[in-house]
Image (cartoon, rainbow, N blue to C red):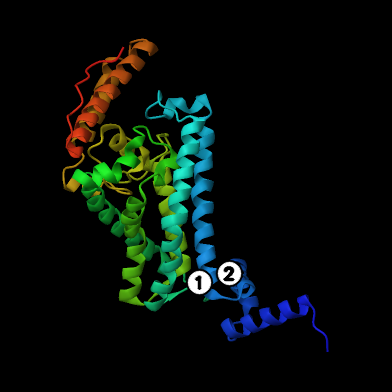
Amino acid sequence: MTFNATTVAAAAAHAAQTQLYANIDLTKLSWLEQMWAAWYIWIDNPIIATGLMSFLLHEFVYFGRSIPWIIIDAIPYFRRWKLQPNKVPTAQEQWECTKMVLFSHFTIELPAIWLFHPMAENFGMSTWQVPFPSWTTMLPQIAIFFVFEDMFHYFAHQALHTGPLYKHIHKIHHKYSAPFGLAAEYAHPAEVFILGTGTIAGPILYCWYTRNLHIFTVYIWITLRLFQAIDAHSGYDFPWSLQHIIPFWSGAEHHDFHHMAFTNNFSTSFRWCDRIFGTDDKYRDYRARISAQKAAMKNKSKSEREEAERNLIAEIEAEGLRAEAIAEGSTPAPKIVKVQ
């Protein structure tokens, strides 16, 4: 009897299917569930299959979501919705950011992603299993992960704004006072690890406590979390942006102020923690001044309104530079009142 490569591959696939899905009729599953099973049968090693799929998902979603913002930055028409319209990232800045992000992805996130699922599986997380959980099971879990991460990020982010933690770690992320989508994960590797803990600790703790979590749910959570982070750093506030639909959602308008002014708005997805702990006072004062300025200058020319906006942004940035200098323990920058 002779064997060729096709025969051996078919035999290996059959053995994998027999081992993983022996008691499951794959024909009765949804198309996505069948593709899920086919992936695990094809790779023929659940650990490698899960690790590879997890990392590829992260890269595909991160850069796939960033590309539309790169295109938008290149089209002048969209400047009307840019929060800091005079600061558009150059192609060189985008490329430098991309290199740093890829470095962090392969040195920090790849090992963390690869080690996440064996740890979570020890706590009872499902990976290769089908069918998937129902939406009534997954949606409350994802909501819990959002709330947990937001609270974790709030306190960890505040800590990164103090002394050596800021000077030697978080300062890299604040390189851009006007952030853009790709810069969401532009950060020191230590910061990627620290703040990334809030993203994966929620699912791990939930799995440890309930023994009821599928990695498919985690993938949905990671996808939504990446969308949130990239959009928050986009630098654009459209009339249809989510914060105009869900009032307690942070969005770009909330986080852009943090980069511009250095202080305030430490949370990620929601505005609750900043409001509860009073770390949005400067932000709310800034929004009030913006509204008052627009009302007072509604009959002025476009150039006069733009100059007034630039002056206000310059004033806030100057205050941010002084706050940053204090955090680093260096001499505060001189006060700037007006920019011509």
The residue nearer to you, when weighing 69 against 160, is 160
Ranked by sequence position, the earlier of labels 2 and 1 is 2
Crowd class of label 2 (few under 14; some 14 to 19; many from 20; radius 10 Å): some
Res 131 visible: no
Q: Amino acid at mark 1?
A: Phe
- Label 2–label 1 contact, CB within 8 A: yes
Residue 333, image x, y percentages: 21, 26
Residue that badge 1 annotates: 132
Residue 101, image x, y percentages: 45, 46
Q: Is residue 317 left or right of residue 116?
A: left
Residue beneath the point at 19% across and 44% down: 163
Q: Is residue 246 left or right of residue 74?
A: left
Crowd class of label 1 (few under 14; some 14 to 19; many from 20; radius 10 Å): many
Residue that badge 2 annotates: 36
- Give the number of the mark in front: 2 or 1: 2
The residue nearer to you, when weighing 80 against 70, is 70
Vertical placement of residue 137 versus 308, above or below:
below
Residue beneath the point at 33% across and 10% down: 300
